[in-house]
Image (spheres, coloured by chain):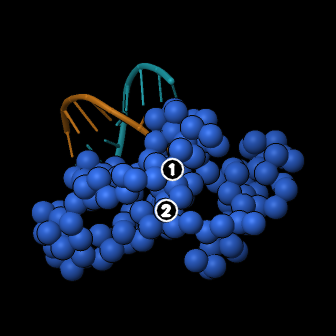
Chain colours: A blue, B orange, C cyan
Amino acid sequence: MAELDSEKPVYSIGIVQEKTGLTGRQIRYYEESELIKPARTKGNQRIYSQSDIEKLKEIKEMLEKGLNIAGIKEKLGTVNEVKKKKKTKISESLYDGRPLTKFNRGKRGLTSLYPVSDRAQLLEILDKKDNDKD
DNA sequence: ATTCTAACA
DNA sequence: TGTTAGTA
């Protein structure tokens, strides 16, 4: 059914922002610092896995503890070609430039039942209720 | 509407 | 880090 592969990239940066409390700027900066290596879609959009989110949370905590990027690199280690064996080609098969975002996050079948504008508002409300399941 | 890169405050 | 411009 719904395999929960923590390595499978499915989250858009927007969702990662909500889940980690970090800003998009920070998330992208940490990637630039080689602390994380999210996958990309054909449209070049970043798609994060659950493990990416967890690592981001660790980074956030370490940063709050006063460590700098360099220090974190030594602690967690740079994500140097770790998962190079099985390439998740999900980016080519499922997400053609459109990763999981607020619009298509697991919300039963109302994903495409409402006009885009109303859907955004609706999903946002549903998400708040659904937010405490993490 | 959402994300991306690059660049400047 | 925040933000903004111009895109995809």
Lateral position of residue A36 relative to residue A112, left or right: left
Q: Position of residue B1 (x, y in %)?
A: 62, 43
Where residue A7 is drawn, which disc sits there?
2
Q: Which residue is mark 1?
A: A88
Chain letter of disc 2?
Answer: A
Q: Is residue A110 visible?
A: yes
Q: Chain of mark 1?
A: A
Which residue is located at x 37 percent, y 57 percent?
A83
Residue A121 occupies which quadrant of the picture?
bottom right
The location of residue C7, given as percent across then percent down, is 47, 20
Looking at the picture, which amino acid does disc 2 mark?
Answer: Glu
Say which of A38 and A129 sits in front: A38
Residue A28: image tag = none
Find the residue positioned furthest to the front: A85
Q: Earlier in the sequence, mark 2 or mark 1?
A: 2
Which structural element holds mark 1?
Answer: loop
Q: Could you tell me if the residues under marks 2 and 1 are in contact, i.e. CB atoms within 8 Å?
A: yes
Q: Amino acid at mark 1?
A: Thr
**Of the pair A130 and A3, the residue shown nearer to us:** A3
Residue A30 visible in the displayed image: no
**Does residue A37 appear left or right of residue A100 in this picture?**
left
- Residue A110's x, y, as percent? 84, 54
